[in-house]
Structure formats: structure tokens, C-alpha cells
Amino acid sequence: MIFLDKPYLIILVPAIALFLFQYLGGWKIILDVNKGKPPRKLKDFPSIETSEVDYKQVQYKIRSFCDSALKNKTIELSLNEFEINTLAVKGSLLNKYIPGEYFYYQIKEDSIIEKMIIWPFLSAKGYKYRERWIYFVTKTQLWERTQVFDGTLMEPYEKTLPISYSSLIVFVLGGSKTSASLTLNAKQTVKYQQALNIIEKLRNVEIKQGFLILET
């Protein structure tokens, strides 16, 4: 049979071994968490204590900004770390020790750091951890530096994007359902088009004194 040929075995055996190794890593993290021994990355991953009331207050603040911006009024929206995270989790209290995908936003000096952890994950450690630093260069452009850890620390990669490609900004302005990414389906909605209309009216985007600030 073709699968018994040596060239195929040379490729197939290591691939199967790697898959099993990663698969066992996924099971190990589940067992460790159930025993109350989560990996350090998961244990240290920040959580937020928020509520539906907090979420509604942030929503009202953003809705007022968007309504005024669409009417060509001069207005400022300032969101702190708590408000951004409340918006990201929609006011829910999440338990990071339940398998899933979790995000946390930290404002530090002139950047926003987006932290993400997914578990279980097909890797030696059983999880994937990512940090993305977001810097707003101008009112129309941002710079991102992303680093991923899924058992080994991978080389960071950097890119410059227009503000309209920022999943976080589009999410804040109500143009998508998640702050993590911009899907093709999201870009085909009326809400996304409204968010782009607001982005075009922005005259300033910056991080200042612990706040994400948008100005029209």
C-alpha cells in the first residue's frame, strides 16, 4: 500500500506524533485546571468585575457620542480601561477557568494592550496566549505589534493599518459584535457602514492619561 512507502512514513509518523503530543497538552491543561493547578499564564490572566448596569452606562455614553458625530457635532468620547473591558464582555462576569477564549484590554502609557488566551488549544502547553500592542499614529492610522505564545514564544510581527481596519475601534463604535476581529459578515452590515461614517469624521484618536479618546 502507498502509506507503507518509506517517504510517506517519514512524513506521516512525525506528524502523528506531533498531533498526539499537542492533543495530550490540551487534555493536561483541563486536568490541571480541574485539580486547581492552572498554568501560570491562565492564573495571571486578568479578569474584570463588572455588571449589566455598568455595560448599559458605557453603551449610553457611546451611543450619545455616535448620534452626535453622525449629526456633525463636535464631541469627545473618552473610555478608560474598565469601560473598554466592560464593553468587550458586555457586562458579564466571566470565569476564565472554564474552557474558552478570553480577552482583556490594558491601557498603558501611549498604547492599548490587547491580551488573549484560548484554552484548551492544540499545543504542548494546551493553551494559546497572545498580546497585541496598539498605537495610534495619526487620526487615520495605527500601528500594531503582535506576539504569540502557544508553548514557545514566537517572533513578534508588526503592521500599520488604517483606523477603519481596527477591530477595537469599529467594535467601540458599534460596527461589529466582537473586539477581537473584523469578519467579512461584519463588514457587510449597516452598523459597520455607520461606524465607518463616524471614523471619517474623527479629527483625533489618542491614548492620554489612561483614556482612549476619540474626537470629532
Image (cartoon, rainbow, N blue to C red):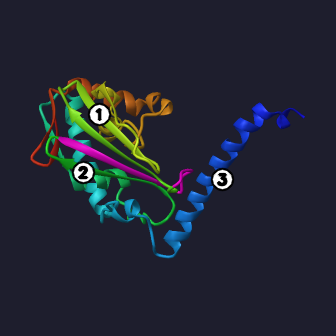
**Alpha-carbon distance for marks 1 and 2?**
14 Å
Magenta part, dominant SS: strand
**Above or below: residue 115 compared with residue 164:** below
Residue under label 1: 144
In the rendered view, does 138 fall on the left or right side of 195? left
**Alpha-carbon distance for marks 2 and 3?**
35 Å
Amino acid type at image mark 1? Glu
- In front of the other: 45 or 194: 45
The boundaries of the magenta stretch are 111-124
**Alpha-carbon distance for marks 1 and 3?**
34 Å
Residue 192 placement (x, y as % from top left): 38, 31
Residue 95 placement (x, y as % from top left): 42, 66
Label 3: few (<14), some or many (≥20) within 10 Å?
some
Residue 133 placement (x, y as % from top left): 27, 40
Secondary element at image label 3: helix
Residue under label 3: 20
- In front of the other: 214 or 143: 143
Q: Earlier in the sequence, mark 2 or mark 3?
A: 3
In the rendered view, does 7 fall on the left or right side of 46? right
Residue 39 sits in quarter: bottom left
